Image: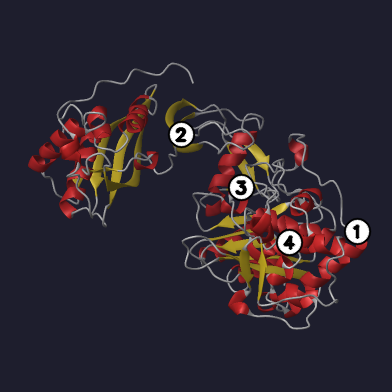
Amino acid sequence: MGKRRRVAERRKTKRPAVLGGVIAVAVVGGALGAYSLFGGDAAAGAGITASTRKAVKTGPLSASEVTMASTAFLTAWENGDVARAAAATDDSAAATTVLTGFAKDGHISAVTLTGGTHTGAEVPFTVKATVTYKGLTKPLSYTSKLTVVRRTADGAATVGWKPSVVHPDLQDGDRLVTGDAGTPPITALDRHGGELTAAKYPSLGTVLDGLREKFGKTAGGKAGIELRVVRKAAAKGTQKTPDKTLVTLSAGTPGKVQTTLSPTLQAEAEHLVAAKPKASVVLMRPSTGEILAVANTDHGFNTAFQGSLAPGSTMKVITASMLFEKGLASPDKPHPCPKTATYGGWKFHNDDNFEIKNGTFKASFARSCNTAFITQAEKLKDDDLTKQAQQVFGLSMNNWAIGVPTVDGSVPVQTAAQMAASLMGQGGVRMNPLNMASVASTVQSGTFHQPYLVSPSVDHRTIATASRTLSATTLAQLREVMQYTAAAGTAAEAMAGLGPDFGAKTGSAEVDNQKQPNGWFTAWKGDLAGAGVVQQGGHGGSTAGPIVAALLKAGSGG
């Protein structure tokens, strides 16, 4: 990064931070005195005894406590008094590290903080500052928020510490750094050569960061000078979250990276997810693995590629393939679908406790009967589902290399009730829309093709493969039940008009502390396959289904 210029000493006298448009100097002074006295490990020196602790204040925070605690923190930070600002939080050591780095490594000065009107214990505020490095200067402006909590030791109102208070993009272990960008910028191109930007396609912000992280040093560009969020090192076996540029002081020369994205389908995907509070979708080509579109309502995290969520009944595609191979089910043979089924001490039930009397497996799959799968658990080994996911569908091996960070799904070996729950996409099973789009692709094409965003030929990376394929008989059975689900089952309404070369599966995944389940949908139409999730959306057929179906329709020209 080169030598960094010594940061000039801050002025000692400065106006107090403005909170909600009011400057309360007397109150601020008292608050700062209190936090200086009791912050960090100063409790013992302040004379707090066992008898004092019995009087620890509890209960909801008052408006004045929220105002005093937040103003104390903001004023100290604005004045460059790191020690006092850190003492106004519930983790002074961690706060000291981040606040010190803000000025020293971020080369950020002339900080002005303006608090907004609090909602309960949450206080929004704006930050205006200056970034200066090697004679280059740029303004910095953003919004953040803090939450006031009661300190455990004494019940005092204090700022609940987390790095995102200082900047909303900061997570534990991240740093703000200004200097020569280690990785040159890139210009990402769609499959036709057009430029992809976050301004035009908002969901691609994290994708573009990932492309730069992966290909910036080899794409022929030259680094500039930037203020960046430098992410913490990745844990063993995981992919590092890409660094993020916040301010460009000196633009570098970008290299070019071509992707597989379709500009028209990407635009359509952006439009479709924008209509939902929290949706994600992926569209890909089964015959090659090319990713044609990826979009998320939330632009701060790429749930479509990096999410790790229970996939609900869409997992039954993998489970059904296993049951067919083992001779435990066949589309048109009778198969039990009772109201409830017990395994491992847990009692499982169907939605609204429905049952299908004298029905076939195809009927149970199409209506998403949970007990039709739970009743087979006693005939399975604990690792059967894990092997099926890995060997046939290429999942849960942490070896995908699509060109940007992704989570490749997780199907851990489980026992008893958890193993049974995993058969229907609950328990410890975790997926994202990219994973489930790949599952539909494998069914459509008959072979696992690892999804990719940048062709492997660009950097000669090794892409993941599956160790085996389904037999022709099993593949035909799996396609049959998915086609029936798309034509006459829970996916029929969403897939109407897209047949006959199609197949689908819906899913709903229960999540603790959520009133509504996450709605899932995975489907194929011709040489297109997609999957989506709407978090807290309810049933997949009516939430994620229309998004995926509309994208399939757009891609097939219908």
Q: Residue at x 69, y 41 (%)?
A: 398
Amino acid identity at mark 3: Glu
Residue that numbered label 4 is attached to = 529
N-term mark: 4 or 2: 2
Amino acid identity at mark 2: Asp
Which disc, if any, is residue 135?
A: none
Q: Give the CA separation, mark 4 to mark 3.
A: 25 Å
Residue that numbered label 3 is attached to = 195
Observer able to see residue 528: no
Residue that numbered label 1 is attached to = 471
Q: Nearer the viewer, mark 1 or mark 2?
A: 1
N-term mark: 2 or 3: 2
Q: Residue at x 33, y 40 (%)?
A: 161
Q: Where in the figure is residue 61, as x and y percent of width and height?
A: 22, 53
N-term mark: 1 or 3: 3
Q: Give the CA separation, mark 4 to mark 1.
A: 21 Å
Amino acid identity at mark 1: Ser
